[in-house]
Amino acid sequence: MKNSIFLYPVCGVALTAFLQVTLYPAYPLYAFLVLSLFGLLIVHNFSASSVKFILFFLSPFLISFSSILIFYVFPDSRFIGSDLNWYGRVVNIVLLFSFFMLVTNLITKDDDVDGSAKKFQLYLRCYLLGGAVVLLSAIWHALDIHTGLVVFPFETRSLVHSSAGLLDQVSGRVTGIASEPSYLVPFLIDLIAVSLLLYGASLRSALFVSLSVFMIILSLSPSGYVSLISAFSLAGLLYSLKFKISKRVLFSLIILMGVIGGLFLWASRSGYADYVIYRIATFNPESSGRAFMYIYPIYWLMDSSLVNIMFGFGAKSYSILSYYYSAPSGHYINVTSNNYFVDMAWEAGVVGFILASIFFVFIFFKIFKSSLPRWHFFVVSFFAFHLLISSMFRADFASARYFFILSIIYLAIYKPDVFLSRRYIGGADEASR
């Protein structure tokens, strides 16, 4: 209990994680991350399972850091080594590693299961509060765009683009205080999952779910639509493979599907679905800058030396591609492909890509074999599938949000007791019925 004071910085990270996707500096978040580093140095007592878990996830990054040396020793004539700036990635990973290790230590090392569950609940509530700030800002922005009754003063990338004349009557996409819709949506889906963990099948979670889904629809983010529908469907499939679906769970899922389905039906009749379908249908490297950034780096990698193919070009090396290449459509190449696996393939080679893929296979296997009660099994599976699918659209693998979700998955696998305690709101009594 004497180390409980260090729960404040990790809860601070959970509370301020959303700042990384806004247009404004995330100074409070990094202050809490630094405090987490100091907390870890003081506590320096953690389980072997947490070390193995996070090092497994970080293994492609460790390869990419090693590949920096390869980049300099065996230079590629296409690139200039001095363009590579990897120092920020190292600092970021060290801080996030410290955060993960500290929060898992604080929650798993408490001898009192109810005490661990209470800490876990506080941790979730802090992330929920930060997500609620994002949700409220999205509602504010939606009221500005669609009613004009209020003024949203923040400048974000909300322009409706690549619409081929669809939705000309809509003046913008909902972003809230996030920089753009694809930054907003992952936090809203996180909010859905956290509310379901905390409140189970209740009116409070139904409110969070319905408002979040509504804002996701108004964001007009194709990746958001795909992530939400796919994560929900795949979590349901995994659930059906492990459990016989009870009447209570079936009823809860039908209500949840009804809320989501009704909102998407409204989206279809309003023309929003047509716009998203058009964006997905025209996803090709000749007309889409994002598609180009997904596909062509793989060709460039395969056209490299065997050493680079196997181990990549090093951490942050994707960010220098814009110095040497441009998309046929005229779009610039971003500092990231917005796809975790493509980034890892380029930065850590085939070996890094394989390790990144195996890690996700590992967590789904461990979740399937876990002793989680039915409701929490479904929600944690939803969280994990959401992390996997959103990783294909948003390469935010070095963010506080990503490590927050990793900590939830780790606790579900190795400390399921925190989901079972009576002190936990969505606990065993409610979830196992």
Image: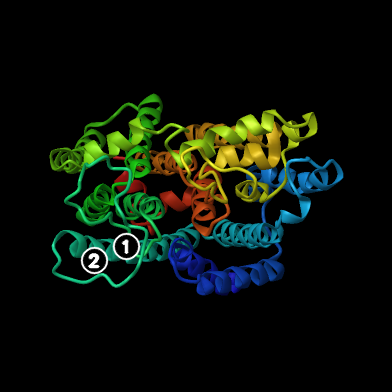
| Residue shown at the point (50%, 60%) measured from the top left | 116
The quadrant in which the C terminus is found is: top left
Instruction: Tell me if residue 31 comes above or below residue 208 in the rendering.
Output: below
Task: Point out residue 12 in the picture as x, y percentages from the top left corner.
Answer: 49, 70
Say which residue label 1 marks: 176
Q: CA distance from mark 1 to mark 2?
A: 7 Å
Task: Point out residue 53 in the picture as x, y percentages from the top left corner.
Answer: 63, 45
Q: 387 or 164, which lies in front?
A: 164
Q: Is residue 223 left or right of residue 343?
A: left
Q: Amino acid at mark 1?
A: Gly
Q: How is the image coloured?
A: rainbow
| Residue shown at the point (62%, 50%) measured from the top left | 319
Q: Is residue 298 left or right of residue 309?
A: left
Q: 98 or 356, which lies in front?
A: 356
The quadrant in which the N terminus is found is: bottom right
Q: 119 or 274, which lies in front?
A: 274
Whether residue 313 is visible, yes or no, is yes
Task: Point out residue 108 in the picture as x, y percentages from the top left corner.
Answer: 57, 56
Q: Is residue 328 left or right of residue 214?
A: right
Q: Are marks 1 and 2 in contact (CB under 8 Å)?
A: yes
Could you say whether the residue bearing mark 2 is in a helix, strand or loop? Answer: helix
Say which residue label 2 marks: 140
Q: Amino acid at mark 2?
A: Trp
How packed is label 1: few (under 14 Cα within 10 Å), some, or many (20 or more)?
Answer: many
